[in-house]
Image (spheres, helix red, strand yellow):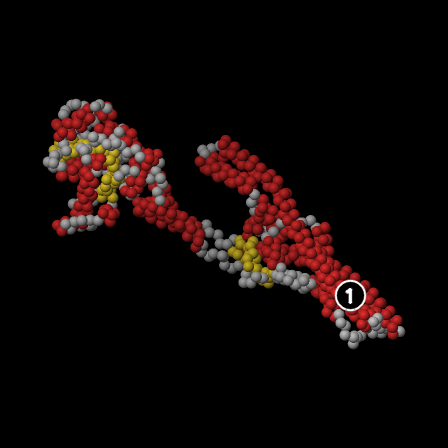
């Protein structure tokens, strides 16, 4: 009579572990189940958290200075836009070269937040920032502090130290370039003097007079045919003079200056090393463990384990310092090498430009000499004097341009710097935030969400069955049907009214009848007579389901239906039907009386009841005999259907004996009460015991959900 048990992979999976539900569904179901607790508690904790956030809020003031950074190259000998200069200055303002002297100032060192900091420079670096203003050349240097005067003091001190550093560096570079240009000017003067002597001698030989006696050499009416080539040679000479000065200046800088790397940059690169990050994470993990141990241990920080862990942290910090020190040298060397490499690349570029100009000058000189030879063939030696005079004028032009460039550099030395403080920082009057809206919102959200988080965590831990689809997915068993929630006041509720209460109760009855119909049409139940109603745990509605299902079967059966209270430890059916529990299944299994004498007929002529009876001792001995099978065999001949209310499967092992002896077993689950893991465990035990589990029933579905899912169908007399 028994069919084969379900042993599908899905069934095994349900007993071993349940798949996690959708997270959003889990949150929604937790809110639905616990909203009457979550919302009031969330509002209370949210308001309390926001009040704490406001009470501990410390206003922060931001002071701001306006800086102007010129993006043009400082040297007029090669004016262009230098975008990298701005980026270098922004990094320089927050480097140790500026912040170190700023921290050493008396007005900064006296500030409490700097004096009490373990690393004053790092503290100052975190408070100082620089942002672009309304144009690419204007920037805001800002600093934040809880003291408005301290914020203004920090900004002005950093700006002052930065300007001092930039001024001294730029002045040294300009002076060196001026000195080199002066050397070029002296060489050009010597060339001009040599040409003047040659022109003087040639003029005396031809005319007998000194052309420079008493006055400067006048302009000749002679139209010089090589003016274009002479002009190009003059410009090239000036450009080559400037390039030679820049090349010599850069070569001297590379020879006499060691490349210095910002300590801030070195520390950032060291901190980004994977080995340093891994060791820091390990130290933080041990510190968290140390804090939790201090709070949980009875002996506190005097615990031996606490002291051992504290010593481990100290050793880890020493190893971290050693690792940072080992990495700092090679990293600083690599960064310095990179800077030197860039400077050498710039030097190579300058030399490449100089060589290009040398080649160009050689080509122009060759062209000049060729045209000069052609002219001499047609004009004779008289042209030599005019050509020498033209060469003198060219050399004089080169000298004048070099002198002019040198003069412009000297002028720039006295000009304003490329970086200028246009507006010093003043003491801010208002804090950055008068009312910390974001902070209050964050704390309120955290407080409000904490109860919901607890509810979600509890539901996630319990894994309650929430829908019939979820139940079907967990057990891989067919869901025979859903039973609506039994109305609390079926006889007439004051709030809903009599008519609506009758509809609700009728909907509940229809859901039971639907389960009965589906059960009778199930192939596995076609030849079954004895049906065991089981559940994984208590409070899942199996007694109500057994009662209502037995009543429904009795209405349609040709022969009587018997309802047996098989939960000997906690019997309940005698109270529902208001009968005595003195005689029942216990006495029948003890063979103190026949089952015919223990059966009670009350109310419905086709529904008989076999109470549990008074239990003395353990029920396992009663169910351990083959008498139960013999009784069930006799009941099959007398009753068309026998419904047995069994004890919970996980709590009482005798339920497995009853389920195995029955023809079919239904697992009753209750919405929001049954746990997925427990349902899977109950099904697994029943299957291993040999019970014929034909499906599940999903109980306690809200009336509104049931009506929405299946609809409501009433006659006029019931409406």
Side of 146 relative to 172 (left or right): left
Secondary structure beneath dot 1 equals: helix
Q: Is residue 25 above or below residue 162?
A: above
Nearer to us in this view, 673 or 662? 662
Side of 587 relative to 312 (left or right): left
Q: Measured from the top left, where is residue 183 in percent x and y?
A: 77, 60
**Label 1 belongs to which residue?**
369
Nearer to us in this view, 537 or 226? 226
Q: Is residue 334 above or below residue 615?
A: below
Q: Is residue 93 above or below residue 293?
A: below
Q: Residue at x 52, y 35 (%)?
A: 310
Q: Residue at x 62, y 61 (%)?
A: 81
Q: Is residue 402 visible?
A: no
On the rendered image, what quadrant is the N terminus found in? top left
Nearer to us in this view, 102 or 687? 687
Q: Residue at x 15, y 36 (%)?
A: 577
Q: Is residue 84 above or below residue 579?
A: below
Q: Residue at x 44, y 36 (%)?
A: 296
Q: Measured from the top left, where is residue 448 in percent x and y?
A: 37, 48
For this orientation, the residue located farthest to the left is: 605
Q: Measured from the top left, where is residue 504 in percent x and y?
A: 19, 47
């Amino acid at each position: 009579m028994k069919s084969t048990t379900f042993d599908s992979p899905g069934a095994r999976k349900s007993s071993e572990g349940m798949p996690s539900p959708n997270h959003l569904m889990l949150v929604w179901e937790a809110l639905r189940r616990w909203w009457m607790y979550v919302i009031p508690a969330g509002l209370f904790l949210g308001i309390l958290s926001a009040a704490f956030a406001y009470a501990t809020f410390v206003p922060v003031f931001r002071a701001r200075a306006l800086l102007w950074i010129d993006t043009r190259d400082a040297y007029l000998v090669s004016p262009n836009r230098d975008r990298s200069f701005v980026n270098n200055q922004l990094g320089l303002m927050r480097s140790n070269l500026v912040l170190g002297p700023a921290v050493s100032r008396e007005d900064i060192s006296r500030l409490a937040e700097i004096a009490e900091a373990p690393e004053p420079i790092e503290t100052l670096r975190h408070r100082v920032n620089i942002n672009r203003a309304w144009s690419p050349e204007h920037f805001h240097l800002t600093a934040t502090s809880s003291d408005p005067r301290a914020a203004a003091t920090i900004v002005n001190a950093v700006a002052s130290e930065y300007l001092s550093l930039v001024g001294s560096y730029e002045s040294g570079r300009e002076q060196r370039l001026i000195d080199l240009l002066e050397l070029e000017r002296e060489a050009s003067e010597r060339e001009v003097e040599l040409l003047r002597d040659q022109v003087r001698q040639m003029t005396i030989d031809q005319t007998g007079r000194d052309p420079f006696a008493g006055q400067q050499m006048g302009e000749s009416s002679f139209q010089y045919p090589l003016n274009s080539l002479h002009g190009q040679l003059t410009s090239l000479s000036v450009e080559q003079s400037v390039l030679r000065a820049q090349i010599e200046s850069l070569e001297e800088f590379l020879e006499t200056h060691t490349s210095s790397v910002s300590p801030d940059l070195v520390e950032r690169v060291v901190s980004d090393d994977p080995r340093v990050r891994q060791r820091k994470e390990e130290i933080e993990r041990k510190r968290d463990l140390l804090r939790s141990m201090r709070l949980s241990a009875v002996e506190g920080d005097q615990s031996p384990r606490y002291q051992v862990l504290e010593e481990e942290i100290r050793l880890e910090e020493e190893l971290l310092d050693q690792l940072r020190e080992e990495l700092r040298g090679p990293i600083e060397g690599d960064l310095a090498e990179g800077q030197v490499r860039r400077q050498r690349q710039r030097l190579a570029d300058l030399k490449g430009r100089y060589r290009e100009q040398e080649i160009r000058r050689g080509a122009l000189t060759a062209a000049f000499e060729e045209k000069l030879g052609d002219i001499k063939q047609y004009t004779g030696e008289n042209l030599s004097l005019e050509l020498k005079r033209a060469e003198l004028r060219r050399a004089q032009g080169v000298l004048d341009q070099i002198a002019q460039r040198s003069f412009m550099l000297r002028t720039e030395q006295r000009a304003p710097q490329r970086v200028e403080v246009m507006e010093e920082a003043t003491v801010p009057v208002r804090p950055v935030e008068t009312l910390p809206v974001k902070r209050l919102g964050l704390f309120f959200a955290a407080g409000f969400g904490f109860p919901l988080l607890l509810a979600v965590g509890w539901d996630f831990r319990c894994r309650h069955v929430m829908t019939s689809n979820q139940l079907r997915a967990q057990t891989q068993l067919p869901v025979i049907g859903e039973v609506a929630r039994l109305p609390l006041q079926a006889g007439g509720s004051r709030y809903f009214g009599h008519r609506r209460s009758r509809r609700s109760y009728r909907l509940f009855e229809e859901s039971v009848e639907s389960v009965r119909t589906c059960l009778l049409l199930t192939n596995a139940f076609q030849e079954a007579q004895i049906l065991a109603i089981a559940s994984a745990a208590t409070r899942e509605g199996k007694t109500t389901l057994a009662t209502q299902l037995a009543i429904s079967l009795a209405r349609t059966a040709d022969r009587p239906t018997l309802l047996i209270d098989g939960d000997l430890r906690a019997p309940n059916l005698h109270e529902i039907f208001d009968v005595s529990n003195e005689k029942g299944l216990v006495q029948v299994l003890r063979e103190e009386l026949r089952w015919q004498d223990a059966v009670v007929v009350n109310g419905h002529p086709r529904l008989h009841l076999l109470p549990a009876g008074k239990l003395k001792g353990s029920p396992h001995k009663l169910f351990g005999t083959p008498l139960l099978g013999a009784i069930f065999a006799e009941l099959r001949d007398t009753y068309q259907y026998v419904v047995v209310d069994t004890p919970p499967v996980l709590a009482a092992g005798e339920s497995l004996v009853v389920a195995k002896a029955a023809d079919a077993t239904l697992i009753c689950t209750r919405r929001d009460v049954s746990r997925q893991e427990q349902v899977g465990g109950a099904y697994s035990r029943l299957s291993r015991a040999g019970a014929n589990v034909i499906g599940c029933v999903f109980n306690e579905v809200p009336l509104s959900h049931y009506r929405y899912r299946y609809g409501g169908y009433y006659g006029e007399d019931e409406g």
